[in-house]
Structures are given as structure tokens and as C-alpha cells.
């Protein structure tokens, strides 16, 4: 999986620069999201991999699946992706693009794992604290992870905050062993 992200990043960054330059972040976001959904479809993957179809035929098919009214930039992007055999990387390209777009708009996604379901007030307080600390608007994706015993873990990009009982017990065990 890490390999696809490595392949996807330059494509996403190039598309992001183009979209930002032309003030078309929204349309590009929508096009990439739709292409990602198409790329996850096994039938589409089979058609792209089938040598019976030329790259131009596949490109026309993808453009028609997008609704047909896409700009020349999107069509060129599809052509480049197909030419370089990066069709399977489209979901990762869309993901990296969305993270770049969110950063540009001053927004970040925090993956919050909690030992117990969080109330709306608790989640609001946590996101407000994170927003103040990170100086960005925080969009929270919350999951319940009973193995934490208590507390929460928060992941925002490379930043990990472990405020769980399991984390504290692990740290205590490590300090006792050394």
C-alpha cells in the first residue's frame, strides 16, 4: 500500500498545483473522487488491463463515465494516468489530493479512537482543543476501540497523541523494565 502512495503523491501534487492555479479545487476534487470510485470497480480494472482496448478507447470510456462534460485538463490527466499504467493508483491520488486541499483550506482530519463512545459535548471539546492547538479547523473521524481500556488516541497526519490507559500502562511497563 505504501508503494501506491509513493506513486500517487507526484500525480496528486501536480494536479493540486494545476487546480489551485486555475481556482478549480472543487471540480478537480469531484473528478478525482469519481475516478477513484471507478478505479475501485473490478470490471473497470479488467477493462483497463485488457490489451484488446487501446488507451484512447479506455480514456473515452472513463470520460463518458464521468458524465462526458469534463475539461481538457481532466482528459489529459486520464491519458497520462493510463499511459503510465497508474489506473490502480487513482484512489490514492484522490486521497492525497484531498489532504492537500484540506491543508490549503486550513482543515485537517483527526482520527480519534476512544475506549467508549464520545458524547457530542466531549467530541466538541476535544475538537475545539485540537483546533486551538493545531491552529486549523479539525474534522473528526471517531471510532470506538475498547482495547484502549480508557481514554483516547488521536492521529493527525504524522502527529499521534496517546492519552489512553493502555498507552499509559505500556509506558509504565517500559520504564519498569529499564
Image (cartoon, rainbow, N blue to C red):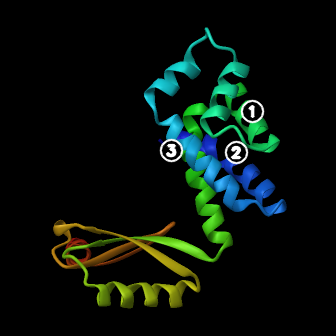
| Residue 164 shows up from this direction | no
Earlier residue among tags 2 and 1: 2
| Residue contact between numbered discs 3 and 2, judged by CB atoms under 8 Å | no
Tag in front: 3 or 1: 1
Residue drawn where x is 72% and y is 42% of the image: 69
Residue drawn where x is 46% and y is 32% of the image: 41
- 19 on left or right of 147: right
Residue drawn where x is 56% and y is 14% of the image: 50
- 70 on left or right of 169: right
Earlier residue among tags 3 and 1: 3
Residue designated by label 1: 80
Question: Residue 67: percent from the left, percent from the top?
Answer: 64, 40
The tag on residue 2 is: 3
The tag on residue 11 is: 2
Q: Quadrant of residue 110?
A: bottom left
- 125 on left or right of 9: left
Question: Residue 4: percent from the left, percent from the top?
Answer: 55, 40
Q: Quadrant of residue 172?
A: bottom left
Q: How many marks on residues?
A: 3
Residue drawn where x is 29% and y is 77% of the image: 152
The quadrant in which the C terminus is found is bottom left
Tag in front: 3 or 2: 2
Label 3, label 2: how many angstroms apart (C-alpha)? Answer: 15 Å
> 75 above or below 121?
above
The tag on residue 32 is: none
Which residue is outermost to the top?
52
Question: Residue 10: percent from the left, percent from the top?
Answer: 70, 47
| Residue contact between numbered discs 2 and 1, judged by CB atoms under 8 Å | yes
Label 3, label 1: how many angstroms apart (C-alpha)? Answer: 21 Å
Amino acid at each position: 500500500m505504501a508503494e501506491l502512495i509513493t506513486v500517487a503523491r507526484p500525480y496528486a501534487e501536480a494536479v493540486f498545483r494545476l487546480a489551485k492555479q486555475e481556482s478549480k479545487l472543487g471540480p478537480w476534487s469531484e473528478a478525482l473522487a469519481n475516478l477513484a470510485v471507478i478505479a475501485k470497480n473490478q470490471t473497470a480494472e479488467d477493462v483497463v488491463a485488457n490489451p484488446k482496448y487501446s488507451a484512447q478507447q479506455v480514456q473515452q470510456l472513463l470520460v463518458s463515465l464521468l458524465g462526458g462534460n469534463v475539461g481538457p485538463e481532466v482528459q489529459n490527466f486520464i491519458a497520462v494516468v493510463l499511459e503510465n499504467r497508474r489506473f490502480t493508483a487513482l484512489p490514492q491520488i484522490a486521497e492525497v489530493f484531498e489532504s492537500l486541499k484540506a491543508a490549503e483550506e486550513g482543515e485537517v482530519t483527526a482520527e480519534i479512537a476512544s475506549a467508549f463512545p464520545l458524547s457530542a459535548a466531549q467530541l466538541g471539546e476535544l475538537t475545539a482543543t485540537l483546533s486551538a492547538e493545531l491552529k486549523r479547523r479539525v474534522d473528526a473521524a471517531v471510532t470506538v476501540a475498547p482495547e484502549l481500556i480508557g481514554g483516547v488516541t488521536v492521529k493527525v497526519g504524522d502527529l499521534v497523541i496517546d492519552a489512553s490507559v493502555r498507552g499509559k500502562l505500556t509506558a509504565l511497563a517500559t520504564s519498569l523494565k529499564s
